[in-house]
Amino acid sequence: MDRREALIRVIEALHAEIAALKSNDVAGLERATAAKLQHIEALAGLGGGAAPGELRALAEEAQTLNETARIYVNLMAANVRRRLHQLTGEGTTAYRPGGAIAAYC
């Protein structure tokens, strides 16, 4: 496998990761993430150096997709955190007696 093929496989795995995140497919996310990491390791084993134009474009696409996946994960984490706060009653008011703000009064 050459660097181009390895990058294409990383990109495919990132697309699969994003699709799994969008559909809340935990098993699909695990498979896609494992595949992505495997292809990144393969890519690392091929060495570095200057990348010609096409490889640079593929690397930039992979970086953009990885950033997109990161944003999805952060949004999901924020939604879970917000929902947990709603369920536990935390964070529903700006001031609670005995809370952190009361310590300054």
Image (cartoon, helix red, strand yellow):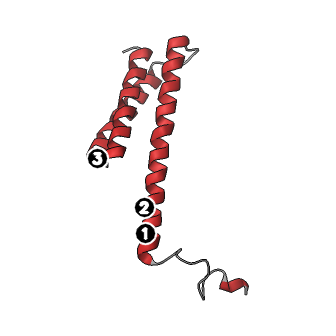
Locate residue 47, reporting x and y percent. 50, 19
Q: In what quadrant of the picture does the N terminus appear?
A: top left
Name which of mark 2 and mark 3 comes first in the sequence: 3
Q: In what quadrant of the picture does the C terminus appear?
A: bottom right
Mark 3 surroundings within 10 Å by alpha-carbon count, few (fewer than 14), some (14 through 19), many (20 or more): few
Task: In the rendered view, tell whether residue 2 sits above or below residue 70.
Answer: above
Mark 1 surroundings within 10 Å by alpha-carbon count, few (fewer than 14), some (14 through 19), many (20 or more): few
Residue drawn at x 55%, y 12% is: 53
105 vs 62, left or right, is: right
Name the mark on residue 80.
Answer: 2
Dividing the picture into quarters, in which one does residue 12 lie? top left
Would you say the residues marked 2 and 1 are in contact, meaning their CB atoms lie under 8 Å apart? yes
Dividing the picture into quarters, in which one does residue 49 lie? top right
12 vs 68, left or right, is: left
Which residue, as the protein is rendered here, is positioned at the far right? 105
Name the mark on residue 24.
Answer: none
Which residue, as the protein is rendered here, is positioned at the far top? 52
- Kind of element beneath mark 3: loop
Measured Cα–Cα span from mark 1 to mark 3: 21 Å
- Kind of element beneath mark 1: helix
Mark 1 lies on residue = 84
Name which of mark 1 and mark 3 comes first in the sequence: 3
* Amino acid residing under circle 1: Leu
* Amino acid residing under circle 2: Val
Measured Cα–Cα span from mark 2 to mark 3: 16 Å
Residue drawn at x 34%, y 39% is: 19
5 vs 50, left or right, is: left
- Kind of element beneath mark 2: helix
